[in-house]
Amino acid sequence: MTAIALIRPFTDSLRIAFMGTPDFAVPALETLVQSGLKPVVVVTGPDKPRGRGRLIQPTAVKLAAQRLGITTILQPASVKNKGFAHQLFELGCDIQVVVAFRILPRAVFTAARLGSFNLHASLLPRYRGAAPINRALMAGEKVTGVTTFFLKEKVDTGNVILQWPTLIGPNETAGELHNRLALLGARAIVETTRRIATGRTHAIRQNDASATSAPKIFRDDCRIPWAMPAPHVHNHCRGLSPFPGAWTLWKGKQLKVLRTQITCGHGEPGRVLKATPRLVVACRQSAIEVQELQLEGQRRMPAAAFVRGRNVGPGTQLV
């Protein structure tokens, strides 16, 4: 029996508001529509300059909503505006689904009859915050997952509705994990919506004593710590790939390291040990092989191509 057949008897008249902005939220919106749970309204960020050309563009969620035939799209400049909360209340929604959106005030997340829930890309209470995918990989976690939870005023602390875990590959990057969790999360959102609509939620309070944080990533956080052991450096690089990108300096230029693997080697941290055909760099313990990188102002490329085109040989120091 299909997901649509399971849900429709309970949700034909269900009014859903969907809130989200980036690519991560798009599979959730698409899966809701495919499952017969088309939102009556989509709330997303304002159109603004994006990309290298800095042209005014809509959000990824707005583009998806238009493609899916959703005609009511709200783009509030501020979610704290009382008029926005009133607008939501007037729409008479039963459930608000939030994926990668802004921190909502109480007047907004209490506007839905049956409640508002959020999708978070970790197994809460671990990795509460803005960068759970990056931080989990940087910490060398082997398991992560997605969590849906009812919203409350303190960010990422609401009662958990469901959690679905997934293993992390030893060389998986943040970008790859992001895409997998977006798809896993989309299915979790449909299941969560079904549970709320049928009154079968058994939300569990989070254990704050077990909480860890996943704060926003800043540029200085991304500098490669060559003085750390190779596993730490490897996790740092894959946890920041492809964005914002772990970086080091080569001849005064920023060099992003986007894909690595742990290998054998010994030398001063940051020193190139081998450059043909493999680019091997020493860490405090052992070494990493750089497989993919990007020099500032240029496109990403295989490390072998970078080495061939530039004077990078054994003894070169990365800082």
Image (tube, grey):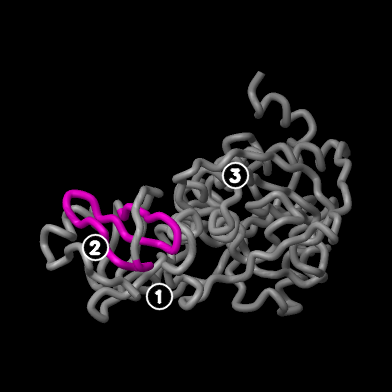
Q: Nearer the viewer, residue 267 or 122?
A: 267
The circle drawn on residue 242 is none
Please provide percent x and percent y for residue 182.
Answer: 55, 47
Q: CA distance from mark 1 to mark 3?
A: 37 Å
Front residue of 234 and 46:
234
Does residue 269 show up magenta in the picture? yes
Q: Is residue 251 left or right of residue 187?
A: left
User: Which element carries disc 1, helix, strand or loop?
Assistant: strand
Question: Image height check: is 83 above or below 313?
Answer: below
Residue shown at 71% from the left, 79% from the top: 81
From the image, tell me which residue sits under label 2: 299
Residue 196, percent from left and from top: 82, 42
Of labels 1 and 3, the one closer to you:
3
Kind of residue at badge 1: Pro
* Residue lying at 76% horizontally and 37% vertically, measured from the top left: 194
Indicate the secondary structure of the residue bearing disc 3: loop
Q: Earlier along the polypeptide chain: callout 1 or callout 2?
A: 1
At mark 2, the secondary structure is loop
Q: Quadrant of the C terminus?
A: bottom left
Camera-nearest label, 3 or 2? 3
**Residue 316 location in percent, x, y?**
23, 69
Q: Which mark is residue 142?
A: 3
Q: Residue at x 80, y 69 (%)?
A: 154
Q: Does the magenta portion include 278? A: yes
Q: Is residue 111 visible?
A: no
How much space separates mark 3 and mark 2, taking CA atoms?
Answer: 30 Å
Q: Is residue 17 left or right of residue 278?
A: right
Q: Position of residue 107 (x, y in %)?
A: 81, 71
